[in-house]
Amino acid sequence: MRIDLHCHSTASDGTDTPAELVRNAAAAGLDVVALTDHDTTRGYAEAVAALPSGLTLVTGAELSCRIGGVSMHMLAYLFDPEEPALLAERELVRDDRVPRARAMVAKLNELDVPVTWEQVARIAGEGSVGRPHVAAALVELGVVPTVSDAFTQDWLADGGRAYAEKHETDPFEAIRLVKGAGGVTVLAHPAAAKRGRTVPESDVAELAAAGLDGIEVDHMDHDADTRDRLRGLAKDLGLLVTGSSDYHGSRKTCELGEYTTDPEVYGEITRRSTGAFPVPGAGGA
Ligand code: AMP
Ligand code: FE
Ligand code: FE
Ligand code: ZN
């Protein structure tokens, strides 16, 4: 069983449509794939309709959170997408991404970069707009060679010259909301230092005490030592350990299935969730 529990589509900042994502997941030899777009579930219907037989879809989302001034991501799995409180919070974060992206465009204009909101909106399409879309505009304009090169203090990294904050949920509130919607929570890439400040272990311990289910350990942004440390932390705190690609199509270098989750952990995630069931592929559209 090959299980990849963290992937993005054009519903947020990935480059595969949800249908392309599930087809590519099957072609990559995966048995289970999770769709975890930033702050949205809008890709679900298309992914389900296109789901190849032999592939199971785990519905989820990656929720933008902040604790003590540090931005962090909370993966949420198998929650009820209609549950009103969590739905309202996703909408709040997603809607705030628009004025926030406009603010980043304004900051770039102040820096004499001729990017426009129309250009960013065209790149984002129907997806919840984020920094990778702004970064793709900078690539189009020849300001930086790749999307990743825009994530520096000169441009869009946390605290960078053209960075703007968006509304982000308190992670204790996120855990409460996801549990209220029958879902399971996993702290995404908790030690991805190249993305900026990371949450201290003391915060992870408090989140665990508040009901956090797991942490993502095997991830491209964690080196071998970091993974060992996180595995020890998970053991101490009684947390599940996942591994995932954090696939974003051509906007990042990681391939589908490059990191995977142990089938026993996957089984535990499905046992704990009451908000939704994994969807077995019926052959696809
Ligand atoms: P946002 O949610 O708009 O603040 O943007 C965060 C997203 O930017 C993350 O989910 C990643 O997809 C992307 N990102 C963050 N750091 C990097 C990086 N160093 N290189 C490429 N993409 C990044
Ligand atoms: Fe992303
Ligand atoms: Fe993330
Ligand atoms: Zn992600």
Image (cartoon, grey):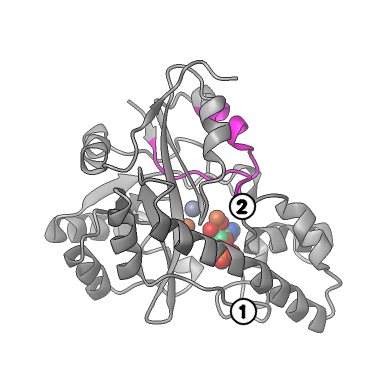
Bounds of the magenta span? Answer: 4-25
Q: Residue at x 52, y 52 (%)?
A: 40
| Residue at (47, 61) in percent of width and height | 88
Q: Is residue 19 magenta?
A: yes
Q: Is residue 220 visible?
A: no
Tell which quarter ligand 2 is in.
bottom right
Disc 2 target residue: 13
Residue in the image at 66% along x and 82% along y: 161
Characterize the local packing of mark 2: few (<14), some (14-19) or many (20 or more) Cα atoms within 10 angstroms: many
Query: Secondary structure under badge 2?
Result: loop
What amino acid type should be assigned to the residue bearing mark 2? Asp
Q: Position of residue 19 (x, y in %)?
A: 60, 31
Q: Which structural element holds mark 1?
A: loop
Read off the residue under disc 1: 160
Q: Position of residue 62 (x, y in %)?
A: 45, 54
Q: Is residue 92 above or below residue 217?
A: below
From the viewer's perspective, tell me whether residue 105 is left or right of residue 48.
Answer: right
Tag 1: amino acid: Gly
